[in-house]
Image: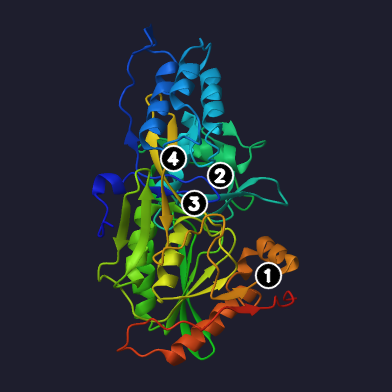
Amino acid sequence: MKQGSFPSQILRAFFFGGVLATATALIPTRPADSRTDGIAFKDSPKVVLDEAWQLVNQYYVDNTFNRNDWQAIRKDLLSPSYSSKDQAYSALRSALKKLQDPYTRFMDPEQFTALTTQTSGELSGVGIRLELNKVTKILTVVEPMAGSPALKAGIKAGDQILAIDGKSTRTMNVEAASALIRGKVGTTVKLRINRGGTQNFDVAIGRQLIELSTVTYSVKKEANANIGYIRLGEFSSHAASQIQKAIRELDKQQVNAYILDLRGNPGGLLNASIDIARMWLNKGTIVRTVDRVGQDDSILANQTAMTQLPLVVLVDGNSASSSEILTGALKDNGRATVVGTKTFGKALVQSVHQLSDGSGMAVTIAHYYTPNGTDISHKGIIPDIQADLTAEQVAQLNAKPDLLATKADPQYMQAVRSATKLIRAYRPDVRPNVTVTGVEVVPPARAAR
C-alpha cells in the first residue's frame, strides 16, 4: 500500500459527488482522433462521443465495464449519422446506462456549467439574496451580501426589484431573475428599485466575482459550556478556508468543544474534505482508495490540526460522499463522537472532465474506504449515538430552518449532551481520542411546540 499524499495531478482529478451533483477541478480532454474505422467525423457530434468514450475506456474503475464489450459500444456510438448534438447526447447517455453506475454520467454544456459553478463556491453577480414575496408576489431583496457590489451600491433588505436591464420582473421567478442579474465580471446590470412605496429609481451595479458562503458558525451557551457550532453545507472550493476562519473565530471566544453539523451535506471536492480533516486530525489515515488496477493509496493527516478540543459530528441520511470521508476519518481515528442517523453510503470516486464543446463527463475511477478499511457503499456510516427524528420533527425543521441547532432540534440537543460528556472527560495534555462508548440509540422525542 502506498502511503502519503496523492500526486497532485491525480488529486486534482478526484471529487466525491453525493446525493446531489457536485464538481471538481476540470481536466481538459485531448481532442479525439478525427477518423475512426475509416470514417471522418471532424466537427461532428461524434467528436464529443469519442472523447467521452475514451475517458471511460481509460479511467473507469471496472475494467470489464459491467461485463460489456466497450469496443463494440464505441462502434455502435460512432456508426450512425446524427442530425443534432441532442441526438448524439441521447445516444451517449444510453451507452453509459450499460455501466449501471449513476455517478458516471454525461452533462450537456448547461448542466456542466451549473456543476462547476456549484462547487467553485463562487459566481459572477452583484451579491444579493432574492425571494418572491408571499404577500406582494414581487421579487424582493432578502439581504445584500456583506462586502458585495449590491451593498456598496446602497441596496437594502426589502427593496423590490421591478425590472432588470429594462425587463419587467412581474412574471419572473427567483431563478429567472438571478440568471439575468448574473453575468460576466466587469459588466454592469441596471436594477429598477421600489423602496417602501416611494418613487421608483434605477441603480447600476458592476458585477464582481462573489464568494458564496457554505459555512455558518456561532457560540452556543449550553449546559454551562460554550460550544462552537459549525454547519457546513457542501465541500466547495472555499469550504476549507471558511471552516478555518470559523475555528479561529470560535477559538478566540474560548469555546469548550465543537459540534460540526454535516446533516444534509451532499459532498463535493475531495481537496476540501482532506483539508478540513487535517484541521481536526494531527495523525492517522484520512481515506484509502483503490483504483481499477488495484493500486491502494492512503491520504494521511499531517500534524496541522488547529484544535485539540472535543468534537461531535452531526450526520443524517443525506450526509454523503465527502461528508462521509470526513466523518469516517474523524470516527475511525477516535477524534469525534458521531451523532445522528446512518449516512448515505456512497463509496466511489469520480473525476470530472470538460469536453471540447463545453459539455462534460464525470467518470468513476476508484472505490474508497474509511481508515479502518470499511466499505460504506450502500451501507453508510453508523453513528456512535443514533438520534432519530419523527416525521413530524423532520417536517418542522424543513419548514423552519431557523429551528436547526436550537432546543427544537432533538439531534442537535443530543450532540450537546455528547459534547458535555466529552468536555468532562477532556484532558488538554492527552490526545483527544475519547468517544462516548458504544452505540446508543436515542428514541425520537416529541416535536417541540
Mark 4 burial class by Cα count in 10 Å: few <14, some 14-19, many 20+: some
| Residue at the spot of label 1 | 389
Nearer to me, 195 or 254: 254
Question: Dots 3 and 2: beta carbons under 8 Å?
Answer: yes
| Residue at the spot of label 3 | 155
In the rendering, at what x and y percent does residue 376 appear? 50, 59
Q: Residue at x 64, y 50 (%)?
A: 197
In the rendering, at what x and y percent does residue 72 appear? 47, 21
Q: Is residue 54 left or right of residue 197?
A: left
First in sequence, mark 3 or 4: give its number.
4
Q: Is residue 125 visible?
A: no
User: What secondary structure is found at the residue carrying circle 1?
Assistant: loop
Q: Is residue 176 above or below residue 355?
A: below
Task: Check disc 2 and give the amino acid type.
Answer: Ile
First in sequence, mark 1 or 2: give its number.
2
Q: CA distance from mark 3 to mark 2?
A: 9 Å
Task: Check disc 3 and give the amino acid type.
Answer: Ile
Quarter in which the N terminus is drawn: bottom left
User: What secondary structure is found at the residue carrying circle 2?
Assistant: strand
User: What secondary structure is found at the residue carrying circle 3?
Assistant: loop
| Residue at the spot of label 2 | 193
Question: Dots 3 and 4: beta carbons under 8 Å?
Answer: no
First in sequence, mark 4 or 2: give its number.
4
Task: Check disc 4 and give the amino acid type.
Answer: Asp
Q: Is residue 165 above or below residue 77?
A: below
Q: CA distance from mark 3 to mark 4?
A: 53 Å
Q: CA distance from mark 3 to mark 1?
A: 40 Å
Quarter in which the C terminus is drawn: bottom right
Which of the 4 image quarters holds residue 395? bottom right
First in sequence, mark 3 or 2: give its number.
3
